[in-house]
Image (tube, grey):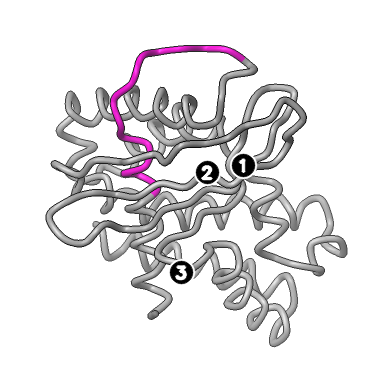
Amino acid sequence: MNRRIFGRLAAASLSLALLAAAPFVRAADEAPDALIQRVSAEVLTEIKSDKAIQAGDMRKVLTLVDGKVMPHVNFTRMTASVVGPSWRRATPEQKKQLQDGFKTLLIRTYSGALAQVNDQKLNVKPLRLAPEDTEILLRSEVLGRGEPVQLDYRMEKTPTGWKIYDINVMGIWMVATYREQFGQEINAKGIDGLIAALVQRNKANAGQKS
């Protein structure tokens, strides 16, 4: 699958996964499937009431994602997994730049995905959760006009609740896909080369949306 297409599909599917209506429940020990459904209702409410978000306004999208989605993602773990072994050799400043660049990359894809959400629905499959479980695989599928789209989450239990750290779209895991791409940049130009590539890619994406 083309990496650009995968990136857009992954972000769109993540958006859809956070858009299933459900009661509002707030608790640190909230079940992972209930968490996805709760956040979904909050995100859907904001999208329906904000035409700027529907049009892909980056400032509004950043605010929405930062406030509603990112608190439920272990983004440090996700970025470290994407960067691979080189993460351990990166300086604190490089780690910050990598996280910022990767986050911007995903959110800029989000802006287009959010604008396209309409009548899709998320079907969360039954989850068997044991009290001792600290990592789980949450399976679901996005239902729309075409064939169902497989969408799975890897999630971990933390002191502040369950967090997402990887997403599987149609059998392709986001972390593994980006790790291959980022690994090529690191092998060719090092950590600073990857940071520079992220900056350039985000600038290009911003230009396409302006």
Q: Are marks 1 and 2 in contact (CB under 8 Å)?
A: yes
Would you call the spot at circle 1 few (<14 residues within 10 Å), some (14-19), or many (20 or more)? many
- What amino acid does circle 2 point to? Leu
Find numbered disc 2 in the image and state the secondary structure of the residue it sits on.
strand
Image location (x, y in percent) of residue 154: 59, 48
Q: Which residues are magenta?
A: 14-27
Comparing 11 with 26, the one in front is 26
Residue 115's place in the image compared with 203, above or below, is: above
Instruction: Decide if residue 55 is on the left or right side of residue 201.
Output: left
Please tell me which of labels 1 and 2 falls first in the chain. Answer: 2
Task: Say which element carries label 1.
Answer: strand
Instruction: Tell which circle, 3 or 2, labels the residue nearer the N-terminal end.
Output: 2
Of circles 3 and 2, which is in front? 2
Q: Nearer the viewer, mark 1 or mark 2?
A: 2
> Which residue is more in the foreground, 84 or 131?
131
Label located before the other in sequence (3 or 1): 1
Q: On the image, numbered disc 1 is attached to which residue?
A: 155
Query: In the rendering, which numbered label is found on residue 138?
Result: 2
Q: Is residue 19 magenta?
A: yes
List x then y, in percent, for residue 164: 58, 42
Say which residue label 3 marks. Answer: 201
| 16 up-or-down from 50: above or below | below
Residue found 42% across the figure and 41% down from its top = 125
Tell me if 190 is positioned left or right of 22 in this view. right
Side of 59 where 66 appears, left or right: right
Quarter of the image for the C terminus: give it.
bottom left
In this figure, what is the number of numbered marks? 3
